Every structure is written in structure tokens, then in C-alpha cells.
Amino acid sequence: MEASSQVQAVAPAPALAGVRQVLADYLELTKPKVQSLLLLTTVTTMLVAAGVTGEPASFGLILATCVGGYLSAGGAGAVNHWFDRDIDAQMARTATRPIPAGRVAPGAALAYGITLAALSFLWLSLTTNVLAASLSLSGFVGYVGVYTVWLKRRTPQNIVIGGAAGAVPPLVGWAAVTGGLEGLPIYLFAIVFFWTPPHFWALSLLMKDEYAKVGVPMLPVVRGEVETRRQIVLYSVLLYAVTQLPFCAGGLGGVYLVASLALGAAFIGLAVRLQRLATRPAALRLYLFSLAYLAALFAAMVADVKL
């Protein structure tokens, strides 16, 4: 009897571990690490919109918009996992993802991604407005249809054109607060759009061999590392110029200007350093800085309208 009761006490543990693994796998399909920056630009833009226009941005509205945005971007991530399962299985960095590792069936991942996108549109339509819901859906379509399916395996300009999908969250956040769009959110969209190539190309320099192995024509694979580093410098300068538009147009003030100048100079400096040194540590440093750069820049926007 004692041995039997011990077996019964231990038996639920494997089942619980299995449930946790399933939940972890379906969470991983939504690419939560990528989501953090998307949600950051959404929230900060909503706070900026409230500060500039005087429209309220309650905690409930911000939370509802973030939930809808996560569902949409998470759905896009799941469909991306489904479509790229063949190349993910060949790359060391992605071989342990849920689908290539055999923990989630491809069809289940596809259905999951489409369901999340549909729920996002419905949720945002009911809790914010149809414009915000439609913009969020456009981000889903852009990431899945334009970047993942059409461009990623066809052209080294994939991240330049397809990167527009990742620049949609500021538009969603602004529309959720104001019900419309005007000049300033377009500038915020442009900032994320021009930030994406140098950010992603720095990472692609670190992953060049894996992309070449599976035949994905990322810029370092097709045009070489020298040209990639040159393009990174070029886009860093373009990004610097675009970040001045919110101040020049009168939407943001001195606090933002100082932050954008300092952060932009540091970004260009690291890009030039990467071009001169041409080392993996220099590429990694620029990549990591680019993450902090975007967060700090959008935080400076909030500080500007709140001070």
C-alpha cells in the first residue's frame, strides 16, 4: 500500500511537465523576445499621442492595445515558424524550435497563427477602434505575406521592404488613442523602418554562414560583408536624419532632440567602427546597442511630452 501511494503521488509530475512544455512551445511560436520591442514602441507611442493631442490613454486602453498587438504579432510569428520549418531544421540556432524539433505539428502551428491574428482583429475592433485593428492586421499580412513568403528567400532587400511590418506598432498605438493618423506617427513609423536594416544586418553578419547554408539571400551572403558594413553605415546616417523629423516638424521638443542627437551619433560611431574593424565583436556590439537605442529613443519621446 505504501509503495502504491508513492507511485500515485509521483505519477502526475510527468503529465504536468508535459503540459508546461506544450505551453512553452506555443508561447515560443509567438516569438516573445521580438514582441518586447514591438510592445515598447506601441506603449510609448500611445503615451506620446496622449501628451501631444490631449486624448486620454488609460491603463485599460494601453493594456487592451498591447493584448491585441501581441496576438497579431504572435500570430505572424507562428505562421513564420510554420513556413520556415524546413530551413529552421537545418540551422543550429533554430533546430530546437517547436516545429523542427517535432514538438508541435506544422498544421497546428499554422492554425494557431491564423487564429491569433483573427482574434487580434476582433479584440482591437471591440476594445479600441477599427483603424487600429486594421493597421495591426496589415502588420500581420506584411510580415507573413510580404517578408516571410515573398521576399525572405528571394532578395537581399527582404529586410528593407519587409521591415515595414515591424514599423506598424507605432501606427497602431497612435490610432488606438486618437482614432486617426497624422504627421508624427508617420515619422515614428519611418524611424523604426530605417532602424530595421542596420539592426538586422548586424545580426546577419553574425549568422552569415547559417543563412548561406540554407540558401537565404541575406545581404552578407549575396553582396558580401564589405558591402553589408557599408550599407549599415549608410542606413545609420539615414536613420539619424529621420530621427530629427519629429523635432523639425514641431511634434517633439528639446529633450527629444538632445537624446536623438546623442543616440544617433553613438549609432553612427558604432557602425563606422564595425566598418573599420570588420570583426564579429564589433557586429555584436552594434546589434546589442541597436536594441537599447530604439528603447531609449522612444523613452525620450515620452519624457519630452511629459516634462
Image (cartoon, grey):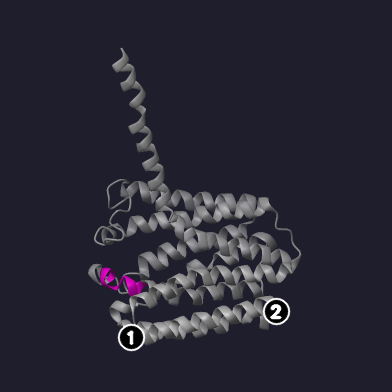
Asked whether the viewer can see residue 60, the reply is: yes
Under mark 2, the amino acid is Gly
Q: Disc 2 on helix, strand or loop?
A: helix
Residue wearing tag 1: 226
- Numbered mark located on residue 104 in the image: none
**What residue is rendered at 28% in x and 77% in y?**
221
> Is residue 217 inside the magenta stretch?
no
Residue wearing tag 2: 254
Give residue 38's position: percent from left, percent from top.
52, 62
Give residue 96's position: percent from left, percent from top.
29, 53
The residue nearer to you, when weighing 50 against 125, is 50
* Disc 2: CA contacts within 10 A as few (<14), some (14-19) or many (>=20): few
Give residue 294's position: percent from left, percent from top.
54, 70
Residue 147 vs 129, above or below: the answer is: below
Seen as rendered, the residue at the extreme front is 2
Most common SS among magenta residues: helix
The residue nearer to you, when weighing 87 against 300, is 300
Q: Which residues are magenta?
A: 204-211
Q: Is residue 204 left or right of residue 49?
A: left
Under mark 1, the amino acid is Val
Residue 275: quadrant of the picture: bottom left
Q: Disc 1 on helix, strand or loop?
A: helix
Seen as rendered, the residue at the extreme top is 1
* Disc 1: CA contacts within 10 A as few (<14), some (14-19) or many (>=20): few
**What residue is rendered at 71% in x and 80% in y?**
250
**What residue is rendered at 32% in x and 60% in y?**
84
Residue 34 vs 201, above or below: the answer is: above
Tell me the CA gap for discs 1 and 2: 37 Å
